[in-house]
Image: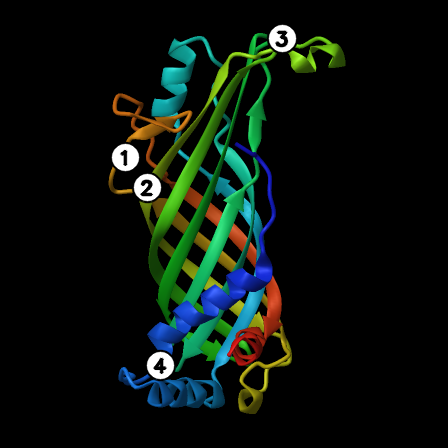
């Protein structure tokens, strides 16, 4: 299991935009292909405020149950604070705000114990729906709720290698994962620099902040080295976050036009 990795931004954004389009298209397209393409074409031509952006910030998780289990077995506890990176897209339809975000926490490793090290990371995708409370000269305020999926990755390994000559040795350890349904509540603020209503934010620099809370209402089973395990610790993904965004207005519109 890799603990690092990048985002394939273009395919991801195309996927985002097509998902948002499903929610935004007014009316229902029939099974007739020309009429469906006409509906999509009308959607593109009708300008709406939209933006694509990068995400960075911090996430905190409540890992008490998991850490109690690890410590009871003699393994180092996990840190509960994580830096995050991600990408997202935003679409405003009058008072409705839709955004889709994919976020990944960076791997957080505890090496305090000389015998073992433990590390964890998460990645999640959420689709949020908000309501625009106020728009003032490019400054947008909106609360939102959303849902998605989250996966946590846990790695525990021996840390007894003393030199590079030990790289062919076998270290005891395991890679574990758990996946949950995710709920998201929060407040967002976006600022479209030099916003002009007539161009719907196109080509504006967009800065934003999100403050919210993630929680998993249900517990799922762990998988240890890809094998389902039913007696793992209850590890739901719950905790507050703060995220900052920077992007460009009009990205969603441009990518949809190129995609179709």
Query: Regarding mark 3 in the picture, which secondary structure is present there?
Result: loop
For residue 66, what is the image quadrant? top left
Q: CA distance from mark 3 to mark 1?
A: 33 Å
Colour setting: rainbow
Q: As displayed, is residue 87 above or below residue 79?
A: below
Percent of width and height locating residue 159: 60, 12
Query: Regarding mark 1 in the picture, which secondary structure is present there?
Result: loop
Q: CA distance from mark 2 to mark 1?
A: 6 Å
Going by the image, does 225 lie left or right of 190? left
Percent of width and height locating residue 16: 46, 65
Contact flag, marks 3 and 1 (Cβ < 8 Å): no
Which residue corresponds to mark 4?
A: 25
Name the foreground residue: 260 vs 190.
260
Q: CA distance from mark 4 to mark 1?
A: 35 Å
Percent of width and height locating residue 140: 48, 73
Disc with the residue nearer the chain's start (4 vs 1): 4
Disc with the residue nearer the chain's start (2 vs 4): 4
Which residue corresponds to mark 2?
A: 180
Percent of width and height locating residue 243: 53, 52
Contact flag, marks 2 and 1 (Cβ < 8 Å): yes
For residue 36, what is the image quadrant? bottom left
Q: CA distance from mark 3 to mark 4?
A: 58 Å
Q: Looking at the image, which residue is at 44% across and 88% down?
A: 41
Query: Regarding mark 4 in the picture, which secondary structure is present there?
Result: loop
Q: CA distance from mark 2 to mark 4?
A: 29 Å
Which residue corresponds to mark 1?
A: 220
Q: Looking at the image, which residue is at 30% across and 86% down?
A: 32
Disc with the residue nearer the chain's start (3 vs 1): 3
Disc with the residue nearer the chain's start (3 vs 4): 4
- The tag on residue 160 is 3
């Amino acid at each position: 299991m890799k603990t690092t990795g990048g985002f394939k931004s273009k395919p991801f954004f195309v996927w985002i935009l097509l998902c948002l389009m499903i929610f935004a298209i007014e009316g229902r397209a029939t099974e007739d292909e020309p009429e469906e393409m006409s509906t999509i074409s009308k959607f593109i031509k009708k300008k709406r405020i939209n933006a694509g952006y990068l995400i960075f910030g911090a996430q905190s998780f409540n890992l008490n149950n998991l850490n109690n289990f690890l410590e009871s077995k003699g393994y180092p506890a996990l840190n509960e604070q994580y830096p995050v990176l991600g990408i997202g897209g935003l679409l405003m339809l009058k008072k409705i705000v839709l955004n889709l975000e994919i976020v990944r926490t960076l791997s957080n490793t505890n090496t305090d114990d000389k015998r073992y090290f433990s590390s964890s990371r998460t990645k999640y995708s959420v689709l949020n729906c908000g309501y625009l409370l106020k728009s003032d000269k490019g400054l947008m305020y909106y609360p939102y709720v959303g849902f998605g999926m989250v996966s946590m990755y846990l790695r525990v390994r021996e840390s007894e290698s003393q030199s590079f000559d030990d790289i062919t040795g076998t270290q005891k350890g395991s890679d574990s994962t758990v996946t949950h349904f995710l709920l998201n509540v929060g407040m967002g603020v976006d600022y479209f620099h030099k916003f002009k209503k007539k161009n719907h934010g196109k080509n504006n620099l967009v800065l934003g902040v999100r403050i919210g809370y993630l929680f998993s209402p249900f517990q799922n089973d762990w998988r240890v080295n890809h094998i389902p395990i039913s007696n793992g610790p209850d590890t739901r993904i719950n905790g507050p976050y703060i995220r900052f965004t920077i992007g460009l207005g009009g990205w969603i519109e441009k990518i949809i036009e190129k995609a179709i």
